[in-house]
Amino acid sequence: MMIVHFFLLIVSILLISSSSAAARMAFLKVDVGARAAGMGGAFVAAGDDTASIWSNPAGLSMIKTEEVAFHHQDWLQDTRYECLAYAYPAKNLTIGISLNHLSLNHIPEVLRDTDDEPKLTNRLFDVSNMSGMFVVSRQVNKNISIGSGFKYLQEQLDNNKVNAGAIDLGCLYTPNNSLCLALSVQNIGYKIQTDRDEFALPLMYRIGAAWKTEVSCFGIELNKATNRELRGCAGMELKIANPITVRCGYQFLTDNEHGSFKDMPEKVSLGFGVKIGRTTIDYAFAPYGVLEDTHRVSIKTKFGQQRFTTEKAAAIEKEGFVEENKQIEEVEKGEKDASEDMVIVTTDNAPLREGPGANYSVIAKVKKGTRLMVVGRHEEMYYRVVLPDGAYGWICSIFVE
């Protein structure tokens, strides 16, 4: 809990001391990834893949295999936003890197005449933003993960170029196998002086919660960015079939003066994902009224060997979820008749996990119709089972009968 208190203290200090200087590099406020956008941006606690690099670096510790992801966004007013990320789960920590590039080309130049009236010229110019990020995330214990990210930023407006650096901090607390609480502070940096003005990076604070099951995830979040009102967002994703996931999200702003929610939603988003082998393709759509609609596409691929979390496995025995060791020994010695504790898999490619919960990594996929011997249970939701090849794992009760 000391880590959680530490991050809350950081947020309090930054909220008090945040500068009133105009913020630029606004692309840092944009949600990255179709999965996050499909859930309305409520991703600070729900993130458990490479997209966590941009929402909460602590979430990167949930990755169990190497991942590479590419994100493309058709954003407002012909703006293009591309992101590439890679994550590697080492033994005690997870490392991630990313490259982001936003471009808006052929903008008409507008100057003011002697009467301070806007006047179009025949000249066009371009705007681009880019960032490179290095993230380190670590699971401190079975409940708490922390992470930090280091950014290099560049903004080019016509022939003027500005460079900057920033830091992201994140914390993830999982009191049980379903609930996740999260906090992150993004774009912590210094004021940047240019030839024309001085500006600050768009400092952003995010706090949220997520509830995860085998087939669904619900997230809710509050965030505050420089020069933007407090924003709330909620979203969910639901697996309607084995390879298909659907998502919806809702964003709303609060009135800072009256503390009440505005009548009309600021943004509603929809999305879906399709998994093909170890590759997942996600799409998200969000309307912005007169500012046009936005479309996001993400492609993520997992590869390499899976990292097993021995701390979680040890915690299962220590906390005594089930008396599985004794039951396993009885079955192996023939002292217990296992025929009365058999289940049949009713869903093809049902996930077999290394622990009793959606947060534990998948160690195998079991075919429909497979008969499994039950050697333990956890809260009537998960069975400790033995595969025909002798391997042990946990399977959710919704996949068996």
Image: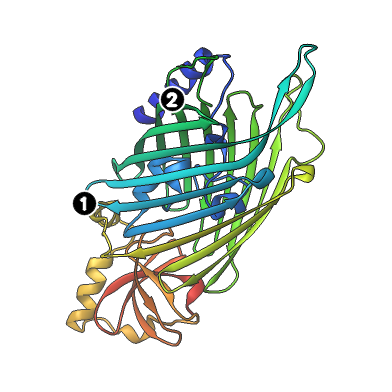
Q: Is residue 220 above or below residue 256?
A: below
Quadrant that contains the N terminus: top left
Residue at the location (57% across, 32% down)? 26
Left-right relation of 288 to 387: right
Q: Is residue 373 above or below residue 281?
A: below
Q: Name the secondary structure under disc 1.
A: loop
The colour scheme of the drawn protein is rainbow
Circle 1 sits on which residue? 91
**Which residue is outermost to the front?**
122
Q: What is the number of the mark on residue 379? A: none
Residue at the location (33% across, 40% down)? 134
- Mark 2 is on which residue type? Ile
Residue at the location (34% across, 40% down)? 135
Left-right relation of 122 to 397: right
Q: What is the number of the mark on residue 188? A: 2
Between the C-alphas of marks 1 and 2, the distance is: 29 Å
Residue 174 visible in the displayed image = no
Q: Quadrant of residue 364?
A: bottom left
For the residue pair 333 and 12, the one nearer the viewer reads as 12
Total labels: the figure holds: 2
Left-right relation of 401 to 37: left
Left-right relation of 373 to 163: left
Q: Is residue 263 above or below residue 7?
A: below
For the residue pair 51 and 310, the one nearer the viewer reads as 51
Percent position of residue 387, x then y: 30, 80
Tag 1 near tag 2, CB within 8 Å: no
Within 10 angstroms of label 1, few (less than 14), some, or many (20 or more) residues?
few
Within 10 angstroms of label 2, few (less than 14), some, or many (20 or more) residues?
many
